[in-house]
Image: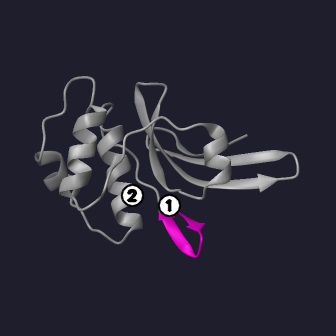
């Protein structure tokens, strides 16, 4: 499944196990930027804990894949004012998802989320 995003298609990948949401998000971001990472090779580069990859470990894997990472807490207001999507979000401190678009509507804002465990979502 892919979605149109700023003249690019956003690739959606479903996580294969209960605990690989973080690495699956990284695979989606890489694919979006034209970087091909093998799921098996990528999974082989680290050992996931029984609760999944940590935020620090995910940043290390992203850096090794050629990305610059910045772990920070940002506000919804910042997301509205700055077009910095796509990005990986640490969701409720236990899950990783991708914010791939923010769109302003008459009634407010829509946030487009790619959740590797659930599919694509629009949140307001």
Element type where label 2 sits in the image:
helix
101 up-or-down from 79: above or below: below
The picture places residue 115, in percent across and down from the top left corner, at: 49, 42
Question: Relative to 1, is 69 on the left or the right?
Answer: left
The picture places residue 35, in percent across and down from the top left corner, at: 29, 68
Element type where label 1 sits in the image:
loop
- What residue occupies the far right of the structure in this picture? 106
- What residue occupies the far bottom of the structure in this picture? 7
Q: Residue at x 27, y 31 (%)?
A: 54
Q: Residue at x 21, y 60 (%)?
A: 38
Report the colour scheme. one colour
What residue would you read off at disc 1? 1
The picture places residue 78, in percent across and down from the top left corner, at: 62, 45
- What secondary structure do most residues of the magenta stretch adopt? strand
Looking at the image, can residue 122 be seen?
Answer: no
What residue would you read off at disc 2? 29
Specify few, some or many for label 2: CA neighbours under 10 Å numbering under 14, 14-19, or 20 or more. many
Query: Is 7 one of the magenta-colored residues?
Result: yes
Q: Quadrant of the C terminus?
A: top right
The picture places residue 80, in percent across and down from the top left corner, at: 67, 49
71 up-or-down from 41: above or below: above
Query: Is 38 one of the magenta-colored residues?
Result: no
Mark found first going from the N terminus, 2 or 1: 1
Q: What is the CA distance from the residue labelled 2 to the residue labelled 1? A: 14 Å
64 up-or-down from 23: above or below: below
Tag in front: 2 or 1: 2
Q: Nearer the viewer, residue 73 or 88?
A: 73
Q: Nearer the viewer, residue 24 or 106?
A: 106
Specify few, some or many for label 1: CA neighbours under 10 Å numbering under 14, 14-19, or 20 or more. few
Magenta-colored span: 1-10
Numbered circle sitting on residue 39: none
């Amino acid at each position: 499944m892919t979605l149109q995003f700023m003249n690019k298609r956003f690739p959606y990948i479903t996580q294969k196990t209960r605990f690989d949401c973080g690495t699956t998000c990284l695979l989606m971001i890489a694919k979006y930027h034209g970087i091909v990472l093998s799921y098996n090779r990528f999974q082989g580069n680290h050992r996931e804990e029984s609760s999944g990859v940590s935020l620090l470990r995910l940043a290390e894997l992203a850096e090794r894949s050629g990305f610059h990472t910045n772990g920070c807490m940002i506000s919804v207001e910042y997301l509205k004012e700055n077009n910095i999507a796509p990005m990986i979000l640490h969701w409720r401190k236990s899950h990783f998802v991708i914010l791939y678009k923010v769109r302003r509507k008459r009634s407010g804002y829509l946030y487009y989320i790619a959740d590797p465990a659930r599919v694509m979502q629009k949140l307001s």
